[in-house]
């Protein structure tokens, strides 16, 4: 009430300068002392993120220098390490932060739509073409970044088409007559060993050297020196999202197992497991019994392969207290493991499981997985 009275008094002073208070500086100071001001919050930098380690920050700064000279960037690393997230970070920190970021999944473009998707088309260029035409990915990325994801899985037709436009920065829309020149920063990403693909004849050597202006490798989660801080950050982020009203606690045994796990699916798998655990827990205290069955089975296998890496006492407790897995649980675990081991290669995974590709596709759809073996409904890409 005192603050409100003081504020109204100050307004009166400003409106009517004939009041005695307006001519008495010491009285004005006493009034101002009764008004409580909250200091304005300083806007945080987009890269002021506790999950960014010194190693990752150094890679971001390196990518900024490469962008300044428009050198193509090739990001390598296992599936799930966060290559798409890293692209967002390098864009926010780089000279093209105000430009567009256009992503292309090179493994998913149909053969018949390659040129129209990449270069767009003019009015009436083919049956069903939109009136007024449609801009392609390269045109949309002008003055920004073109992110070529999963380049190791692209078809030879797409490789040839990309090579031509990357060499000249020019293309002609489908049905068009004049070439269009664009200014794009090319960033490519893959979990495939491209040099091996080149030697095997699956990837063009000239395109490899065109894309590989400079290479940035993202380490798997198990090898990162900041692994524990990443786990703590993601745990806290997900807890804040889930526990808006109720307090959720994680027992030390669960936290210890999460930190010791090898995480073959990397950060994507970590997010899936944490979300599945938090959303399906019956009590506000997360215990060993709340961990997903496939996580438990994977941890058991890992403890057999490397007994030094996991606390044997915790594993024994987990085995004694965890429920017996059903046949469906074992089937799900086997499919996930095969897909992760084969880096999402459906043909190799089906052969490893002893089933046909069609059968594997049906099982992937039934269990709600994607081709990397992760739960597609639990994780939304960044």
Image: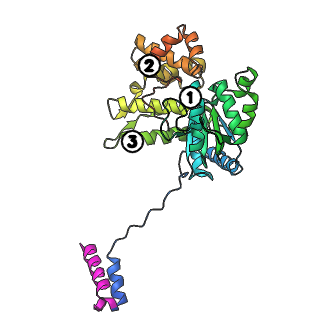
Q: Which residues are magenta?
A: 1-22
For the stretch drawn in magenta, the main secondary structure is helix
**Residue 63 is at least partly visible in this image:** yes
Q: Residue at x 40, y 43 (%)?
A: 240
Q: Is residue 76 left or right of residue 15?
A: right
Residue placed under numbered mark 3 in the picture: 241
The answer to which quarter of the image holds residue 155 is: top right
Q: Which mark is residue 365?
A: 2
The image position of residue 314, as x and y in percent, is 48, 25
**Residue 52 is at least partly visible in this image:** no
Q: Nearer the viewer, mark 1 or mark 3?
A: 1
Q: Residue at x 36, y 83 (%)?
A: 29
Q: Which mark is residue 113?
A: 1
The answer to which quarter of the image holds residue 152 is: top right
The mark tally for this picture is 3
Q: Secondary structure at mark 1?
A: helix
Query: Compared with residue 337, is residue 89 higher up or lower down, i.e. above or below?
Result: below
Q: CA distance from mark 1 to mark 3?
A: 40 Å
> Which of these two is toward me, 181 or 295?
181
State the quadrant of the N terminus.
bottom left
> Which of these two is toward me, 236 or 134?
134
The image position of residue 30, as x and y in percent, is 33, 82
Q: Are marks 1 and 3 in contact (CB under 8 Å)?
A: no
Within-10-Å neighbours for mark 1: few <14, some 14–19, many 20+: few
The image position of residue 150, as x and y in percent, is 60, 30
């Amino acid at each position: 009430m005192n603050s409100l009275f003081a504020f109204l008094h100050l307004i009166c002073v400003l409106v009517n300068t004939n009041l005695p208070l307006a001519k008495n500086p010491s009285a004005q100071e006493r009034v101002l002392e009764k008004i409580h001001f909250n200091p304005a919050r300083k806007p945080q930098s987009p890269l002021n993120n506790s999950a960014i380690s010194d190693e990752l920050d150094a890679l971001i700064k390196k990518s900024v220098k490469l962008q300044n000279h428009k050198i193509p960037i090739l990001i390598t690393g296992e599936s799930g390490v966060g290559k798409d997230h890293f692209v967002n970070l390098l864009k926010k920190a780089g000279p093209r932060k105000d430009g567009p970021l256009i992503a292309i999944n090179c493994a998913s473009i149909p053969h018949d739509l390659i040129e129209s998707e990449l270069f767009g088309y003019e009015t009436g260029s083919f049956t069903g073409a939109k009136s007024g035409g449609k801009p392609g990915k390269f045109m949309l990325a002008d003055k920004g970044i073109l992110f070529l994801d999963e380049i190791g899985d692209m078809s030879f037709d797409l490789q040839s088409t990309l090579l031509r436009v990357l060499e000249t920065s020019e293309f002609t829309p489908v049905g068009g007559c004049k070439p269009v020149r664009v200014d794009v920063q090319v960033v490519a990403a893959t979990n495939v060993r491209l040099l091996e693909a080149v030697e095997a004849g699956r990837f063009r050597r000239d395109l490899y050297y065109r894309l590989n202006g400079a290479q940035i490798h993202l380490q798997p989660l198990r090898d990162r020196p900041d692994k524990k801080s990443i786990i703590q950050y993601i745990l806290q982020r997900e807890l804040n999202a889930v526990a808006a009203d109720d307090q959720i606690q994680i027992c030390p045994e669960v936290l210890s197992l999460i930190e010791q796990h090898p995480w073959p699916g990397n950060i994507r798998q970590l997010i899936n497991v944490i979300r599945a655990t938090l959303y399906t827990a019956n009590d506000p205290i997360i215990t060993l019994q709340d961990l997903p069955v496939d996580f438990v089975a994977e941890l058991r296998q890992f403890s057999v392969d490397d007994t030094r890496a996991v606390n044997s006492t915790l594993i024994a407790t987990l085995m004694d207290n965890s429920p017996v897995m059903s046949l469906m649980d074992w089937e799900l675990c086997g499919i996930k493991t095969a897909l992760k081991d084969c880096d999402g290669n459906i043909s190799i995974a089906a052969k490893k499981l002893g089933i046909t590709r069609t059968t594997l596709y049906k099982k992937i759809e039934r269990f709600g997985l994607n081709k990397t073996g992760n739960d597609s409904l639990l994780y939304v890409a960044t």
